[in-house]
Amino acid sequence: MVVVAAGLLGFASYKATAPDTAKDTTATGPAAEVSADPDAGVYPELAKLARRDADDKLAIGPADAPVVLIEYADFKCGYCGKFARDTEPELIEKYVKDGTLRIEWRNFPIFGEESENAARGAWAAGQQNRFWEFHRAAYAEGAKEKGFGKDRVKALAEEAGVKDLDRFMKDLDGDAARASVKKDQEQAYGIGATSTPSFLINGRPIAGAQPDETFTRAIEAAAERAKTTGAAGKAGESAK
């Protein structure tokens, strides 16, 4: 894991973007302030946490996309489910499909054993190229209320179209799944994330299931910054 200055920075935007837990847990918190300045609130060391691994089974979008959204989430988290159902599909349709955005998932189970089961189940489904199908099934309306015991996680894998359920169950309890989840958790804690969902968009922290416009503005600002940086880099190369 890359050790970054983020441990000192913490999740810089948390107070501005965290959902108001005193209210109805199905509601979102106050909208994050996303400056028109594409450099505002961006931490280069956090941007380096994007893996950009073309073989990452828990990611969607081109590895060389100009914008990478890293999502730290728990399958038992209601806000995470809201984001998965209401916002993420729109981001995929609008930005992933045109090559602007890549979404990288990080398992960040913080609600106990069942959260751990679901996280390892998601990883295991990914080994059979069914991560996003498992993700949709686990975040479906009412899914978390049924719990994430191992039998339930297996049922979700079957619903997601995982072919080899025996392999799935072995992977679920295997050392590789545990190591992967632990690595993701350590990365989240290392940047000061204490709640789910938490996000990085090219190094810009956002916390909570914010309104769609918070994400679209952050993505578009990051894309503009990447375009400007890329153009500057090419100009520098041609001047040599």
Image: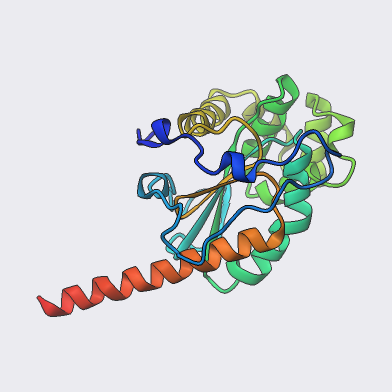
Relative to residue 150, is residue 2 drawn left or right?
A: left
- The residue at 35%/36% (across/down) is 4
Q: Nearer the viewer, residue 48 or 157?
A: 48
Please, is residue 166 above or below residue 43 in the view?
above
Residue 141: % across, % down = 88, 46
- Nearest the eye: 210 or 134: 210
Residue at 32% x, 71% y is 230
Q: Quadrant of the C terminus?
A: bottom left
204 or 111, which is in the foreground? 204
| Total numbered labels placed on residues in the image | 0
Q: Residue at x 40, y 67 (%)?
A: 226
Q: Residue 62 placed where, x, y %?
A: 49, 63
State which quadrant residue 15 falls in.
Answer: top right
Examine the rendering and report whether any part of residue 101 can be seen: yes
Counting from the top left corner in percent of width and height, residue 48 is at 38, 47
**Which quadrant of the rendered structure holds the N terminus?**
top left
Residue 160 visible: no
Which image quarter: residue 77?
top right
Image vertical order of residue 18 relative to residue 147, above or below: below
> Is 130 located above or below residue 231 in the figure?
above
Q: Position of residue 167 (x, y in %)?
A: 66, 33
In the image, is 15 to the left or to the right of 76?
Answer: left
In this picture, is 147 found above or below 78? above
Corner quadrant of residue 92? bottom right
Q: Residue furthest top?
A: 113
Specify the color scheme: rainbow
